[in-house]
Amino acid sequence: MCGIVGYVGKNAAVQVLIDGLKRLEYRGYDSAGLAILDKGVFSVLKKTGRVVNVEKLARKSKSPGTIGISHTRWATHGGVTDNNAHPHISSDGKIALVHNGVIENFLPLKHFLEGHGFTFSSETDTEVLSNLIAYHYKTLGGYNGNRVIESVRQSLMQVEGTYGIAVLCTDYPDQIIGARKSSPLILGVGQGEYILASDVTAFALRTQNVVFLRDDEIVCINRDEFSITTMEDNRVHASIETVDWAPDAVELGDYKHFMEKEIFEQPQSIENAMRGRFSQDSSTSHFGGLTLTPQELRHIDRILFCGCGSAWHSCLVAEHLIERFARIPVEVEYASEFRYRNAPLDKHTLVFIVSQSGETLDSLAALQESKRKGYPTLAITNVVGSTIARESDGGIYQRSGPEIGVASTKAFTAQLTILSMLALYLGRLRDMSYEDGIRFVEALKMLPQQVAQILNQAEYIQAIAHKYAHHRDFLFLGRQSLFPIALEGALKLKEVSYIHAEGYPAAEMKHGPIALISPECPSVFLATQKSIIKKTLSNIQEVKARGGPVIAVTTEECHFPKNLADDLIVIPHCHEALKPVLATVPLQLFAYYTSLARNCDVDKPRNLAKSVTVE
């Protein structure tokens, strides 16, 4: 999780680091800190809480140093204290280090280092690594090459676990060392400056030229150049790429929160997901990155989707759509469980990994396990150059732009849109007719406008949210492809408002959850499917008979009975396959406005971080 920013250049490092940390604060906000190296001395500032606490300390210090490293923490090893905040300085004062990841064998290493005179002031695994590098640096006293690079290399060969690190050494005042394994690290190449970070958003306003480090690579950054080597000390030819995000994409603009901004960006992000991906006759979709030919795809007998959190919910929707329109059996796995199972898969199985960030550790491990077993493995992700994007056999980019809010909104609906288009594509390869394909594409093209219509109801949905914000329990209920949206609606409410919420198939309510129904437990029903609306209305009647408040999301063609629901949200009529996309939007607004009513921190919900890069 955590965020890393390192800087070397001509400007004072403090403000560059603080600005970068603010943009990465969604990755962790338990504590923050920085270390500036100036005239061979570390100036260290760190504090629990938000980055602003460190910024206040920095205003007083006014360090002129032009090289430094910084960190915003999501706690793993050790509680949320000033001592456990990064950076960590080795006990001999030589090494400063920030770290994202987990060192699994830190205890035996700590005991070894204590036996060699190193001391510890924190509970973290990270301080062990800073002292380990210092230990190797000391033992390499007669080494003719770059001692700090070699110290880092030898240390990382001893550790087990995951890491993205940035390292300073007092004897190398113009140099930052970075390295990664299963934790993202990206080099921004600016004009007369370099920025090392765990996410492009940290430096998007300073440069869009980047180098994506790969696992087991070590980068050495000097003021005028950089070089990359492997753990075996082989030179790597660096490829500088350009990130095509607009710099203002990481700015709030006129919005109060990134979650609000990203909800209202969905007409454009859905349009971007579709752009250029329809056939000339508008009867199907196509994707340039799938790498499998239509003939190869016709021989696929089963598809496995893996994801975590909201991505897992989008996979569940894909299961319904692909089985319905392409008649291909689909399985959905939690990525975190897949690699620890020995699930039997047919030899003609295609695997999709779905991850907004492209760095989710569990999803990356699922991808690697799938490839290890020889299955064609494709990715649906939002971040060009991410590890999952690079290691997959091919895939589809979401084109959502940066998503800063911890609770996924526009990335989720972009995933749903792409998965709907994938169901269309596979369906047209099988037995979907030309006319049905035409109708599907026409419906897809209407999505941005229809989402905008729902967003026009924001004030109305805000009033509903305020009405129910005092409740402590919610049920979200839907059928078929709307059941995953019930799960997503419950997740959004939990994430940003801290209200306990559960998603269930509406028909399963009688098999246990109905025991929760009371005037204190509202139910949100997704009643948008005309073919089974009578069944859903019966479920609503059961809730009303027990005094439970009902919020219903429906469409005009369902002819929802007047006064059956306490509050009714009507979304536009659309193709049956696209109702999950439209039904999601009012639930996002409901969660957002409920969070505001409860005075919660919308963009930085407690205990959560945006990109889960640790187990």
Image: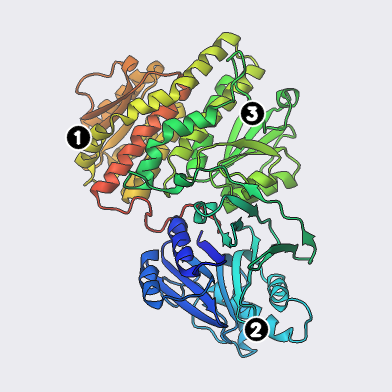
Mark 1–mark 2 contact, CB under 8 Å?
A: no
- Residue 73: in sight, yes or no? no
Element under disc 2: helix
Quadrant holding the C terminus: bottom right
Indicate the quadrant where residue 461 lies: top left
Q: Which mark is residue 112?
A: 2
3D distance between C-alphas at marks 1 and 2: 64 Å
The amino acid beneath tag 1 is: Gly
Which residue in the protein does label 3 denote? Answer: 287
3D distance between C-alphas at marks 3 and 1: 49 Å
3D distance between C-alphas at marks 3 and 2: 53 Å
Element under disc 1: loop
| Mark found first going from the N terminus, 3 or 2 | 2
- Please name which of the two marks, 3 or 1, marks the residue nearer to the observer: 3
Indicate the quadrant where residue 540 lies: top left
Q: Using residue 23 as the reference point, say whether residue 159 is left or right of it.
A: right
- Residue 449: in sight, yes or no? yes
Indicate the quadrant where residue 303 lies: top right
| Mark found first going from the N terminus, 1 or 2 | 2
The amino acid beneath tag 3 is: Phe
| Mark found first going from the N terminus, 3 or 1 | 3
Q: Which mark is residue 593?
A: none
Crowding at mark 3 (Cα within 10 Å: few <14, some 14-19, many 20+): some
Residue at image position (64%, 28%) is: 287
The amino acid beneath tag 2 is: Phe
Name the spot of residue 567 as percent of width and height, x first: 23, 30
Which residue in the protein does label 1 denote? Answer: 547
Query: Image height check: is 198 above or below 275?
Result: below
